Amino acid sequence: MSDTSTPLQALRQIPAGVLCAQDYEILAQRFIASPDYAYIAGGCAHELTLAANRTAFADISILPRMLRDVRHGHTRLTLLGRSLRHPVMLAPVAFQALVHPAAEIDTARAAEATDTCFVASTLSCRPLEQIAQASRGERWFQLYFQPARESTLDLLRRAEAAGYTAIVVTLDAAIKTPSLSALRAGFTMPPTIVAANLANYPAPPQVVLEPGQSIIFQGVMAEAPNWDDLAWLMEQTRLPVIVKGVQHPGDALLLKGMGVDGVIVSNHGGRALDGVPASLRLLPAVRQALGAEFPVLFDGGVRSGSDVFKALALGADAVLIGRLQVYALSVAGALGVAHMLKLLREELELCMAQAGCATLAEIGPEMIFRLKEESVLC
């Protein structure tokens, strides 16, 4: 689609020809304006990590077992004491009104219809209370620390009051570099697209730099959260706290030691620091560091049920779907997101059956074949 073409409006039915979940990524380019698509699909800087996230899945293979009885198979799991029908979750994705007027409301409805845990973003275009009212299903709230602790605490209290059952704290994106692909495509955030949850909070204070100070270190990073901030947040709530953005096993161990309830291995979909390894390559080291029982989730490049299987085999308890939910939302709203999730679940079940795994507990590292082992970080 050219930069001057007009994107199609979202459909009210599943479009013909959608045969797998990843088809929504291809179709979305007809429904999202080119600059907006570049912003959503792109990573940061030169997009090395963005590409690595996808390549990592292609670099490993599934090693199936034969003659196993899977007639009583299922995809149920227990996570943070909660029973889930399947291990596919919807990751927090900001500004969904860029692709559909119903935005996160439709995504939440799709999550409820498919028994999917939905993680609402701090930077959603609809208030967290409206999103909660749209779905009675399992829902978590993703929290960005705000410049004022009072604002952070208010977000937390609002999430608790609205019935969110866990808090996901994103800690890998204190500073974001522009997407070169989005800049080259001419993307600018429309003035109508705003973070509804933050509308009534004071604007960040203007940072005044002294001569010789860095706009990065003393400027942008002046309000970045630290370990003390995370410890303070954990003291303010009884809800489970999951930290998103974990990449180094040493950080994972520190987080476990301070009492967080789970981690999400993630590089922010290649939108934080460019040049870091793919999330999938770091997952086994984090799992090894934390042990078999500690909740470890994963995101980064999942496009199919076999991708879900590989992530589970390498140590994840569940996976989160980011861009793919937005692509499906742009094509067919809540119906599209629900259909995409249905396809992912069916693809996972098919992969499990063919690999000889009746339950998620049977999906382990022995089901993976790769030419060389990944190095394990110290």
Image (spheres, grey):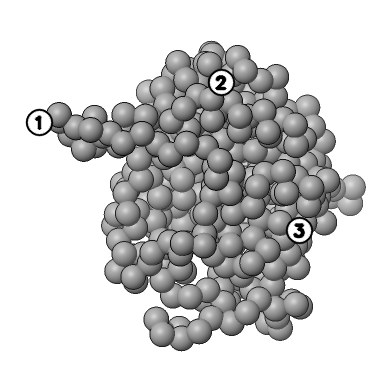
Callout 1 secondary element: loop
Give the residue pinned by disc 1: 212
Callout 3 secondary element: helix
In space, the residues marked 1 and 3 are separated at their CA atoms by 51 Å
User: In percent of the image, x 58 and y 26: which residue is there?
Assistant: 153
Indicate which disc, 2 or 1, sits on the residue closer to the N terminus. Answer: 1
Give the residue pinned by disc 3: 110
- The quadrant in which the C terminus is found is top left
**Observer able to see residue 177:** yes
Disc 2 marks a residue whose amino acid type is Leu
Give the residue pinned by disc 2: 233
Nearest the viewer among 45 and 257 is 45
Q: In x, y percent, where is residue 133?
A: 79, 47
What number is the disc on residue 247? none
Q: Which image quadrant for residue 366?
A: top right
Q: In x, y percent, where is residue 44?
A: 35, 53
Which residue, as the protein is rendered here, is positioned at the far right? 72
Which residue, as the protein is rendered here, is positioned at the far left? 212
In space, the residues marked 2 and 1 are separated at their CA atoms by 34 Å
